[in-house]
Amino acid sequence: MSMLAVEGPDARGLSRLSLQRPDRSNALSAGLVEALLEILAQAAANATRVLVLQGEGKNFCAGFDLSDSEAESDASLALRFIRIEQMLQAIAASPFLTVARVQGAAFGAGADIVAACDHRLALPGARFRFPGYSFGVALGTRRLAALTGAAAAQAILSSGRVVTAEEALSRRLLTAVCDAEAIEAEINWLANGLAALDASAAVTLVTQARQPAPDPDADLAMLVRSVAAPGLKSRLAAYVARARENARSTS
């Protein structure tokens, strides 16, 4: 089964990209990240004007897939994080409008995908978590701060706590929290609006109306410095062990 499903673009330029690893809560394996990068490049070259990113199953995306991390090295894990940052930058700088359609958990790099999108729509009960600093990885820091403000981003990132949909909306991580029907209505409204413009005007509107993006080279350098610190694999293993112990103590 493919890890990704792509629909469109339709006559309005609306495309949908669905993560299809529901048994792993759509966690980002190395192969899935490479597939995402390829699809994003294709969408930039075709008639896509609105790209919806969504996940199959109960959760949007559980973030970095740690299932095979014991077989990896510091270097291979670092490369995977670098490729995720490059994928997030491709979303944030795309020539088309990006819409995150979120249900359930959007954790780690999954939450960073949401933060990289132009419109961030969630079902009630969606939840977010940015645990990267718990294992020393500085991923997506300034994109989150650009949305929420510095103080809120510092609090969310330092605690690694779960953020509810309601708080995410109040912090501007989300643009709307509503039911599935209302989310589809919003997506169609966006697609219809951009379809009424000529191609160059649509690209200009999408790219120029965005909040000024952080320096992508500086963001990548910050991430590289964090993953280059020796012991990345052991830090990730310690984080997983803590998470499992916490889950047992609260069950």
Image (tube, rainbow, N blue to C red):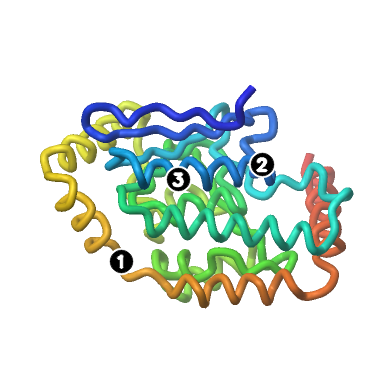
Binning the other alpha carbons within 10 Å of mark 1 as few (below 14), some (14 to 19) or many (20 upward) gives few
Please identify the residue farthest to the top as the structure is shown.
1
- Kindly identify which numbered label has been placed on residue 31: 2
Check contact, mark 3 vs mark 1: CB within 8 A: no
Residue found at x 54% / y 73%: 154
Q: Position of residue 73 (x, y in %)?
A: 85, 58
Which residue is the site of mark 1? 211
| Image-based side of 98 in relation to 221, left or right | left
Which residue is the site of mark 3? 40
Three-letter code for the amino acid on which mark 1 is drawn? Gln
The residue lying toward the viewer, choosing from 146 and 200, is: 200
Q: For mark 1, give the secondary structure.
A: loop
Q: Nearer the viewer, mark 3 or mark 1?
A: 3
The residue lying toward the viewer, choosing from 142 and 43, is: 43
Q: Position of residue 176 (x, y in %)?
A: 33, 46
Residue found at x 43% / y 53%: 91
Residue 170 in which image quadrant = bottom left
Q: Earlier in the sequence, mark 3 or mark 1?
A: 3
| Image-based side of 102 in relation to 49, left or right | right
The residue lying toward the viewer, choosing from 151 and 60, is: 60
Three-letter code for the amino acid on which mark 2 is drawn? Gly
Q: Earlier in the sequence, mark 2 or mark 1?
A: 2
| Image-based side of 219 in relation to 202, left or right | right
